Amino acid sequence: MVGYAFMGAAHSQGWRTVGRVFELPLTPVMTAVCGRDADAVRAAAGRLGWTAAETDWREMIARDDIQLVDICTPGESHAEIAVAALDAGKHVLCEKPLANSVDEAEEMAAAARRARERGQSAMVGFNYRRTPALAFARRMVAEGRLGELRHVRVSYLQDWLVDPAFPLAWRLRREAAGSGALGDLGAHAVDIAQHLAGSPLAGVSAQTETFVTERPLPGEGAGGAVGPVTVDDAAIFNGRLTSGALASFEVSRVAAGRKNALRVELNGTLGSVEFDLERLNELHFHDHTDSAEESGFRRILVTESEHPYLEAWWPPGHGLGYEHTFVHQARDLLYAIATGTDPEPSFADGLQVQRVLAAVEESAAKHSAYIAVGGD
Amino acid sequence: MVGYAFMGAAHSQGWRTVGRVFELPLTPVMTAVCGRDADAVRAAAGRLGWTAAETDWREMIARDDIQLVDICTPGESHAEIAVAALDAGKHVLCEKPLANSVDEAEEMAAAARRARERGQSAMVGFNYRRTPALAFARRMVAEGRLGELRHVRVSYLQDWLVDPAFPLAWRLRREAAGSGALGDLGAHAVDIAQHLAGSPLAGVSAQTETFVTERPLPGEGAGGAVGPVTVDDAAIFNGRLTSGALASFEVSRVAAGRKNALRVELNGTLGSVEFDLERLNELHFHDHTDSAEESGFRRILVTESEHPYLEAWWPPGHGLGYEHTFVHQARDLLYAIATGTDPEPSFADGLQVQRVLAAVEESAAKHSAYIAVGGD
Amino acid sequence: MVGYAFMGAAHSQGWRTVGRVFELPLTPVMTAVCGRDADAVRAAAGRLGWTAAETDWREMIARDDIQLVDICTPGESHAEIAVAALDAGKHVLCEKPLANSVDEAEEMAAAARRARERGQSAMVGFNYRRTPALAFARRMVAEGRLGELRHVRVSYLQDWLVDPAFPLAWRLRREAAGSGALGDLGAHAVDIAQHLAGSPLAGVSAQTETFVTERPLPGEGAGGAVGPVTVDDAAIFNGRLTSGALASFEVSRVAAGRKNALRVELNGTLGSVEFDLERLNELHFHDHTDSAEESGFRRILVTESEHPYLEAWWPPGHGLGYEHTFVHQARDLLYAIATGTDPEPSFADGLQVQRVLAAVEESAAKHSAYIAVGGD
Amino acid sequence: MVGYAFMGAAHSQGWRTVGRVFELPLTPVMTAVCGRDADAVRAAAGRLGWTAAETDWREMIARDDIQLVDICTPGESHAEIAVAALDAGKHVLCEKPLANSVDEAEEMAAAARRARERGQSAMVGFNYRRTPALAFARRMVAEGRLGELRHVRVSYLQDWLVDPAFPLAWRLRREAAGSGALGDLGAHAVDIAQHLAGSPLAGVSAQTETFVTERPLPGEGAGGAVGPVTVDDAAIFNGRLTSGALASFEVSRVAAGRKNALRVELNGTLGSVEFDLERLNELHFHDHTDSAEESGFRRILVTESEHPYLEAWWPPGHGLGYEHTFVHQARDLLYAIATGTDPEPSFADGLQVQRVLAAVEESAAKHSAYIAVGGD
């Protein structure tokens, strides 16, 4: 694993736990974690459960006892590491967004295609697909329970940038993060919308905004040096799926009071579903074929053994948390590797999301003009 | 009052009740109701509490014992009746949307300006401003409780057109209704967004859609004659307020499971509010100055005597309903007439909403191009 | 109508509106309102819509042009007025609780039985039965949708007595109010539990408490004279229905943050329903025959034309308020009078509730001993 | 660890994860798991992460490399194992309820007292105290944020016994489980009520019920042999805390639609809190000192780093699940052992809960008579 901060800790929890809960075709061994600061990475290895600590990802990739590389670094280094790992014959799991640009993402997708021919797997870490409630929603759509979709509505709202004194961290600099709320939250929003609907966005019309344009440099106190914020605080965009459904998106890191509110609603001709990541064990489902008298959104606790991933966990009503999505992601990737099938979401899926994000930025730059999402 | 269908019944309830509940500067007398079908209008007069029944609105306007004309007809006749009534020296209350076109709305606003100089009042019926929870939200914004607004988010979702067998009623024909979900629901959404934020929309980028393009003619059974639907089923649009806040809108009559879901969320630098018309006695308020530990959206039951309009109603927790907005509207109009002040929302406000709707339609026709909202 | 305070205003709203909304077999005429203070009752008559103002209820009862007497006074005078009115040949609607003691309630029920033989109707004002959501819940139970009931759970919580400076109003003196939260809120709780379940309580085990034992006399400022609170602040009691279901009750006027929270839950072998008066347009229904995967409480907006009373009101999602229960109560009483059928809830039903309240008080006085509910 | 079923798996997850997330004074080593079936326990050891598998708990206790014994067996064997382990000088964690009878619990508490003098720790597994939201609620009560408590209201509802075809598992036989919903759910309910309020129950008045009195023997198909259910399906009881607050309890395994609904509400003179285990990341808090206008229950997402246990987990809004309570329990026990302080809840706390359960059963057997909770 490369990187050991927030995402690294979450992924480690996934790797440590997956074999304790699920029957697996392969047993993962947590060989080595890599980071630039030797002391810090050694401490992280001990704490997170990795046997070795490396400081050069190239050396880690060169190790023969490593078959899978898990990339948890900021977006700027994804492409280089992933392509190298794939070309070195490793399976790869890469955090989202796949890359900071469409060009990088295309290289990565091409590397993944080549690797696929050699039997390798490459997956991008859109972990929310593995929330049981959203996995169940996907199953309902695929089985036709919602009929033909009319509306897809996704917002992903947080509020940690409301405070103008929050420092200029790497996520606020374009060269490191690629974009702001758009790449961080919008990538999830776009992926989950397209995944649930089973249909890609044909095009978008967008607006982005940076409300706080300067922030204190990290480590500076009040009144200290400031630097420019070079990414968006928020983005709003609308579009159409190729299926014909209307799709609306709103992502923000300045929505006061919203902590991790990824909200999804799908309205179809036969029913609707609604989800909020802040209540991640619930899916609300309206069955439009119910009688008018008894019709209403049902609050389904997605904790039954019949629900996706739940056969391995606790009895009904004993909810899961955020980190379980990484356990499920690990499980699904191991099955894909073992069976030689394509994992989902693939690097091609990640590239497609990147193209949507690029279209959003282009539209925002062109006064909301409708921009078709590019393809091969 | 002209018209006695859904809106006529609701307005009548307002006029009948207002003097029983509020201290008033003027006592309304329900003189006459007007409609084209003599028998039907006579029956409606008896049922709704009007003394006389008229079949020609011109004759009704000519009566000396009428000082206020309340227009509850479909949008196509608003302009003609309202201008005539204003020119005849009457005060006017006109249902929303003010008109079916910007041109008509401009005529009406001009007539209202002339009438204002003669001391007459003209109000447009955006009754949701009179929901106590939204009136309270407006007060909070005006008093600075939310700080500077970043996001305004309004959706208004219904589902009565999901069924493709629903007949081709007047609300589905452009010549009668002007537009579909846009004029019906979008007019409310735009008005409430601008009213709460205290700032107009500078421009919009939009998409509209008609999913069901043909419907049975009224009175036809299954397999009978059909006609084209000439208005939108749904509209989604984004924009910016002149204050700089981002604003997103979604209106639909094909959102399965949503019955009358006018949802509003405002996020500011000091706090946020959230509202859903399906739970109209509640306002959810997040105070961003609370400690992190004790911070969260509060479910305020807007039923305390300190809340707008509530001094006249029941004890705390004894909720009001939809129709009470019309009682409050009647109250506010009577006060405006009595004190000779401008009522809110004025015909000028109604015209401005009409301009936003026209910009939405233009943007949708031009592939989502950003269209500035016109002005004088 | 006798009495014109909170309940008088609510009942007046019911009488004024019922004929405007519902088709009725009889047209109510609001002849006279009665109260002791001549000026005040005259003002109330004007405001609430009554033609005449009376100061002696005996004279009002003697009037030939009055066929129905509506009693909205404190409980201490219910028995005397109701018996006199019934014996004078009037139909009677009496606010709850029916009386302040079982003895009085028995006299009233006897008078109602005699009157019934003469074709008169007598109804007690348990208006929450007329909340559409609870009327619909009753229909579901009666139709077997919930199967055999296992649990009935009712709490009715308010908080206006949390503040120890709240004055010693009539509702806090035993001689006027009979009891405290028990008679005020518990009467509703017991009635709705028995009504929904279709089965009476066989017996109860109870505890009551007065947390604030002295309060300022009305009109006294801080530091002024105080008097003893002679009724309960709260009561908790459990019991069994004769059907075998377990029933639990909690009523309080010192539950901080709860304004008018009458909450009801029924669990049966085939399903459950849940209701909260603070969200009175909603009924939550769990259908236990749904698949485990798609099972959950549905939030039914009880605003469809198929729902009880709703055929006369607004389109789906346009909610009603507290006062509408009085319109429905008036409607149902007028139908009962017109058709000569027994109205529900009858004085016999009111007497039975009174017996439950007496059993609760006896149990509380006897250290929670189980007390069977008395009968004829 | 003794036992490796549901609770064993949950405890194992706690032991595996605690050192990866929290800074610890001691490093737990998962030495051995014990069970009667050699093959099954060996498989469990491998899956759950224990080094050795034992089939005789006496031998396991005799091992010198084991300092802490974690008991996850059914209640019938708790006393024997715990007393032996304590007397052998081990620290002990014992699942709830502490025992199947007061006598056993007294022996265990005595053994724990003796062990305490030798520096050993003994803790009972009321894991819900370690839900961050409830730990935070406890902190609020302790700091006086709610003032003086008036009401404590706890219900714990599940529905897995609604189906009469559910087999006669060990939890339905008195000799194995001690009691039914009472010991299983009621033990949690009583512990959390007393813990949050910081005051024990003085006495109770109760009713219990077994609705389904015969069930199929395990392994029998439809129409096969049945056996008698010897424990309760549900229990309802009321009581008073020694502090004077009223307390009401309801526990059931036949509440259709409720999966794991441990609901808690505390009403005090300065505020109230409300919690539902089905939404375990939320605490609803009403601050009664807020202005009437802005007052309401706040939905606090208990996921901030300031909240109990949260400093070690994810960013705000990234919720935890059920199993995290076991991680926290492990953490707190290790700190108690390291610092030589008494862990909470102690065996004495467990004994006190057992006495309440015994009082409930006695009251139910004596027609709801009030039974004081026994003491030393």
Image (tube, coloured by chain):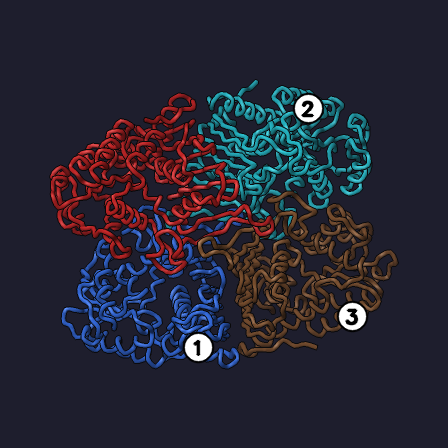
Chain colours: A red, B cyan, C brown, D blue
C361 or A105: nearer the viewer:
A105
Residue A259 seen in this snapshot = yes
Q: Is residue A178 left or right of residue D361?
A: left
Q: Quick one: SS at disc 3?
A: helix
Q: Which residue is mark 1?
A: D227
Q: Which residue is mark 3?
A: C113
Residue C253 seen in this snapshot = no
Figure quadrant of residue B110? top right
- State how far apart marks 1 and 2 are (Cα): 79 Å
- State how far apart marks 2 and 3 are (Cα): 61 Å
Where is C255 relative to A195, above or below?
below
Figure quadrant of residue C71? bottom right
Q: Which residue is mark 2?
A: B79
Letter of the chain that mark 3 sits on in the rendering: C
The nearer-to-camera label among 1 and 2 is 1
Residue at far right of view:
C64
Q: What percent of the width, then of the height, locates residue D31? A: 18, 65
